[in-house]
Image (tube, rainbow, N blue to C red):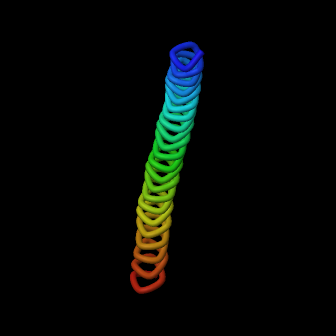
Amino acid sequence: MGRLMGGWMDGWMDGWMDGWMDGWMDGWMDGWMDGWMDGWKDGWMDGWMDGWMDGWMERWMDGWMDGWMDGWMDGWMDGWMDG
């Protein structure tokens, strides 16, 4: 009877510990990795896209506005001064 109980306890403990550890570790690792990867990718992509779009728009708008204003002002001033 003692051996039977000992075997049952060992089997139960081993099975419970293995199952709990495996399930917990797998779930935790999967969840952590998925969350980290998703968060990192989202954050990186969002940051990169935002930075690229903002930088591109600002450079384009600044360059266009500066060029247009300078050209228009120069032309207008030159014409006014010459006229």
Residue 72, horizontal then vertical, whole percent = 48, 70
Q: Looking at the image, which residue is at 48% across and 62% down?
A: 58
Q: Looking at the image, which residue is at 52% across and 22% down?
A: 6
Residue 67 located left or right of residue 2: left
Q: Quarter holding the N terminus?
A: top right
Give the quadrant of residue 23.
top right
Foreground: 9 or 38? 9
Up the image or down, 72 lies above or below 16; here it is: below
- Please give the count of numbered marks on the rendered protein: 0
Foreground: 13 or 47? 13
Residue 35 located left or right of residue 75: right
Residue 12 located left or right of residue 53: right
Give the quadrant of residue 15.
top right
Residue 38, horizontal then vertical, whole percent = 53, 38
Residue lying at the far bottom in this picture: please name it.
81
Up the image or down, 30 lies above or below 6; here it is: below
Q: Looking at the image, which residue is at 59% across and 20% down?
A: 5
Residue 21, horizontal then vertical, whole percent = 51, 32
Foreground: 73 or 69? 69
